[in-house]
Image (tube, grey):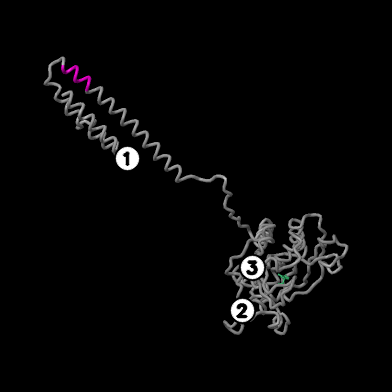
C-alpha cells in the first residue's frame, strides 16, 4: 500500500507538471483529492489492515495528501498571478494621455433672451399662448386685414412680405401681431397673453436687418384698461430687463392696430445718451412698439369696445439681445460661429 500511495503521488506530480492553468489544477484536485479521488479509494481499504499498519499507512496517506494539497495550492497561486498580470497588462490605461475634448452645448442667446423676456411677463401675470394661436404661416387676413391694416398699406407689398404658393392669400407672417387675433377669436376677456415667435420680411440682409427674426407680442384686454396700465407694465419690464438705472421714454407713433400708438426708447447703451453711431446721434434706441388696441380690431373679433379696452405691444428679440449684450451685427445670431455663441 505504501508503494501504491507513492505511485499515486508520483502520478499526481506528473499531471501537475503538465498543468497549464487554474482549470487544470481543479481537474487534478478532483482526480486525486476529492471524495471519489484516488487517495480516498486507498483510505477506504485501511480498515482491513492491522492497527499498527493502519496508523503508519494512515499517517503516510495524510502526509502525502497534505503535501499534494500544498503543491496544488502554490501552482494554483502561480497561475492566478500570471492570469491577473496578463489581464492587467491588457486593460492597461495610460493615465498620462490627455482627455478627449467634448465641447458643452449652450442655450442660444436668442432662446435665452426669449426665455428671460417671457419669464418677466409671466411674473407680471401674462401667460404664453400655445403655438396653435401663433402660426408662422398665416393668411393675409390674420397678418393684415383683421389688424386694421389698409389694403394699400406698403407693408403688404411683395417688397416687404413673403407671399407663398400655398394659396394667393397665404403669407409668412411679417409680425407676431397675428397672434392677437387668433387669441381673441378663441378667448373672451380678460386676456393677458404674450406670444413669442419668428417673423419674416423681404429685406436686404445687412448688419441691422435679417429676412427673418423673432418678436414677442403682448396683449392685455379687460374692462378699464388704460394707457397708464400700458406704461406701468412696459416700464416695469424695461426696469427688470435693462436695470433700473436706464432712462426710458414713450414717443408718439403710429400702428394701424393701435390708437393711440407709441414707441418706447431706452437711453443708448453705447454712449449713455451723448449721441453716437449706434443711436444715430439721438442718444436713444427704440426697443418696442405699443398702443391701445384700436376699437376696429376689437370689433373684428366680436369684443364690445364700449365695454372692453386693451393695450398691445411688440418687440424684437434680436434687437433687445443686441442692446443688452452690445452685439453690433444681427447676422451673428444666425451664422452659428462658435466663437460668438460661446460668449453667452
Ligand atoms: N407688429 C409691430 C411691428 O412688427 C410691432 C407692434 C407695434 C406690435 C405696436 C404691437 C403694437 O402689438 O401694439 O413692427
Q: Are marks 2 and 3 in contact (CB under 8 Å)?
A: no
Badge 1 or badge 2: first in the primary sequence:
1
Answer with mark 2 or mark 3, whichever residue precedes in sequence. Answer: 2
Q: Of tags 1 and 3, which is closer to the observer?
A: 1
Q: Residue tagged by mark 1?
A: 20
CA distance separating discs 1 and 2: 83 Å
In front: 1, or 178?
1
* Prevailing secondary structure class for the magenta stretch in the rendered image: helix
Mark 3 crowdedness (10 Å alpha carbons): few <14, some 14-19, many ≥20 = many
Left or right of 74 in this view: 333: right
Separation (CA) of disc 1 from disc 3 = 73 Å
6 or 65, nearer to the observer: 6
Q: Is residue 83 left or right of residue 331?
A: left
| Residue 48 drawn above or below residue 17 | above
The secondary structure type at the circle numbered 1 is loop
Judging by the rendered image, the residue that carries numbered circle 2 is 139
What x and y, as percent, mark residue 327?
75, 63
Residue beneath label 3, please?
197
Amino acid at each position: 500500500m505504501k508503494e501504491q500511495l507513492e505511485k499515486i503521488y508520483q502520478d499526481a506530480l506528473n499531471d501537475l507538471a503538465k498543468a497549464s492553468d487554474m482549470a487544470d489544477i481543479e481537474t487534478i484536485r478532483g482526480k486525486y483529492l476529492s471524495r471519489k479521488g484516488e487517495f480516498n479509494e486507498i483510505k477506504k481499504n485501511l480498515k482491513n489492515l492491522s492497527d499498527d499498519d493502519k496508523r503508519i499507512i494512515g499517517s503516510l496517506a495524510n502526509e502525502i495528501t497534505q503535501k499534494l494539497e500544498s503543491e496544488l495550492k502554490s501552482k494554483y497561486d502561480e497561475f492566478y498571478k500570471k492570469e491577473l498580470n496578463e489581464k492587467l497588462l491588457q486593460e492597461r490605461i495610460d493615465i498620462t494621455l490627455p482627455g478627449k475634448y467634448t465641447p458643452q452645448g449652450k442655450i442660444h442667446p436668442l432662446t435665452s433672451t426669449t426665455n428671460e423676456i417671457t419669464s418677466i411677463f409671466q411674473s407680471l401675470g401674462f401667460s404664453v399662448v400655445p403655438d396653435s394661436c401663433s402660426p408662422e404661416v398665416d393668411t393675409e387676413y390674420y397678418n393684415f386685414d383683421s389688424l386694421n391694416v389698409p389694403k394699400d398699406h406698403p407693408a403688404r407689398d411683395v417688397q416687404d412680405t413673403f407671399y407663398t404658393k400655398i394659396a394667393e392669400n397665404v403669407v409668412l407672417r411679417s409680425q407676431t401681431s397675428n397672434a392677437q387675433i387668433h387669441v381673441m377669436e378663441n378667448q373672451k376677456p380678460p386676456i393677458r397673453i404674450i406670444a413669442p415667435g419668428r417673423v419674416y420680411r423681404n429685406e436686404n440682409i445687412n448688419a441691422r436687418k435679417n429676412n427673418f427674426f423673432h418678436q414677442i407680442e403682448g396683449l392685455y384686454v379687460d374692462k378699464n384698461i388704460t394707457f397708464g396700465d400700458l406704461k406701468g407694465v412696459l416700464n416695469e419690464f424695461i426696469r427688470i430687463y435693462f436695470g433700473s438705472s436706464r432712462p426710458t421714454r414713450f414717443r408718439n407713433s403710429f400702428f394701424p392696430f393701435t390708437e393711440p400708438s407709441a414707441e418706447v426708447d431706452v437711453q443708448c447703451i453705447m454712449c449713455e445718451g451723448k449721441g453716437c453711431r449706434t443711436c444715430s446721434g439721438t442718444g436713444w434706441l427704440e426697443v418696442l412698439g405699443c398702443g391701445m388696441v384700436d376699437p376696429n380690431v376689437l370689433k373684428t373679433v366680436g369684443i364690445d369696445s364700449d365695454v372692453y379696452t386693451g393695450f398691445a405691444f411688440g418687440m424684437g428679440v434680436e434687437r433687445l439681445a443686441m442692446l443688452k449684450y452690445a452685439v453690433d451685427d444681427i447676422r451673428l445670431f444666425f451664422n452659428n460661429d462658435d466663437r460668438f455663441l460661446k460668449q453667452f
